[in-house]
Image: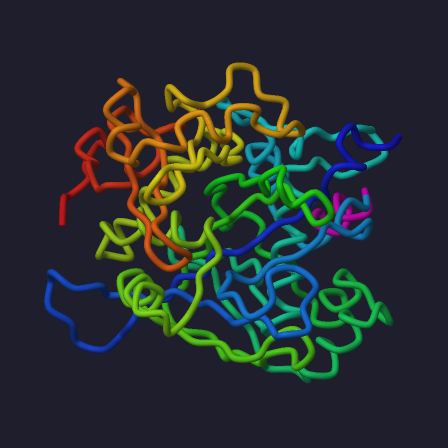
Amino acid sequence: MIRKFAKYWRDSASLLVVARDHASVPKDQYNYKVLVFKRTAKTSFMPNSIVFPGGGFDKQDASIDWNSFFRDRNVSTSALENLTKVAGSRPYLFHTESADLLDRNISLRLCALREAFEELGVLLVHDGDRKSGYSRCVDTFDVATWQQKIHDGKASFQELHSTLGSAPDVLNLYEWSCWLTPSMFRKRRFETVFYLAVLDEKPTVLPEQHEVQEYFWDTPTGLLEAHRAERIWLAPPQTYELARLSYVHDIDQLASFAVNRNRKGSTVLCTVQYNAADGVVFVLPGDDLYPHGYDYIGDNPDLDKYGEQTREEIRRQSKRLHRVEHTDLHHQEFFLNQHPLDDHLHIQGQNAHLQGFREP
């Protein structure tokens, strides 16, 4: 069956990898860093941008054979089933269309893991003895050869794990958010689920030369500051996710939060643009200016409705705010004056609503 929106966008998955920084840091500073990479200039979508590892969904990710594969490696069947029981919002990306296909809540995790390996050589494996909430990376094999074989389609991700006697660590990937490329990018749109992976130490990284120009680790604030200083350019979903991560300094607290939020769902985040006299306003679900019943396909007929007003003047007319205001490609402000969608982190750091959450 052809997926409902297949002609409008592709399905994909990304992995937001954070790893403990074992250097001695004061309590008010980050004890972890985030893994990102710069796309090459030849990349077809957002060249030269700084992104999290990830890419397009592949049919191998949906193979029903994964069910028996996990059973053979003693990965808990009940734990896998728990991944499929999500109480909150479920964008179409998560809909499993046939009983002959692996449940999307598992196959999308496999996609994120496979892409992280293809692009950066980071292989996260199941480990029953792991620290609760954390994943583990292995690199005691010929990473480069397998990375190239999988990237070129000469071997499957499952074949790699069969050779190693391992299993992909889907249980310690935490559903984080779901983003849809705005409708203005008609020819290159993706609906992408972001998963969070938390590691107790930085893994060895081996960048794939055709897709990755360079990679680096930095704190959420460090990446945002480099973006504002125009040393790097972060794609919009990355700025949003790093902004709300920037208020969490402790990796153990972040892991605990991710575990507790894992099955609360993800509202699809697709920005809708309004032009302003001094910039651009991108509204998100929950904002008063977000189109009612938006189908994610059509253009905004009110694009220039407020074009002669400033961003602040437009903002004053709305009671409920959930928006990102841009003055240029490197400078944006985030506004949210209501409870975050899906019990998530607040984009401005107002996280007192989260049980046991410590403000920075």
| Residue drawn at (26%, 49%) of the image | 253
Q: Is residue 313 above or below residue 262?
A: above
Query: What's drawn in magenta, residue-wise?
Result: 64-71
**In x, y percent, where is residue 56?**
71, 53
> Is residue 129 at all visible to an observer of this figure?
no
Q: Is residue 217 above or below residue 224?
A: below
What x and y, as percent, mark residue 81? 61, 33
Provide residue 302's location: percent of width, then percent of height: 51, 24
Percent of width and height locating residue 280: 40, 42
Q: Main secondary structure of the magenta part?
A: helix
168 left or right of 307?
right
Q: How is the image coloured?
A: rainbow
Query: Residue 98 vs residue 32: left or right?
Result: right
Relative to the observer, which residue lies in front, 35 or 317?
Answer: 317
Which residue lies most toward the front here? 308
Q: Quadrant of the N terminus?
A: top right
Locate residue 112: give its quadrant. Answer: bottom right
Q: Nearer the viewer, residue 12 or 310?
A: 310
Camera sees residue 340: yes
Of the pair 206 and 127, the residue shown nearer to us: 206
> Could you tell me which residue is drawn at 52 percent across and 47 percent down?
194
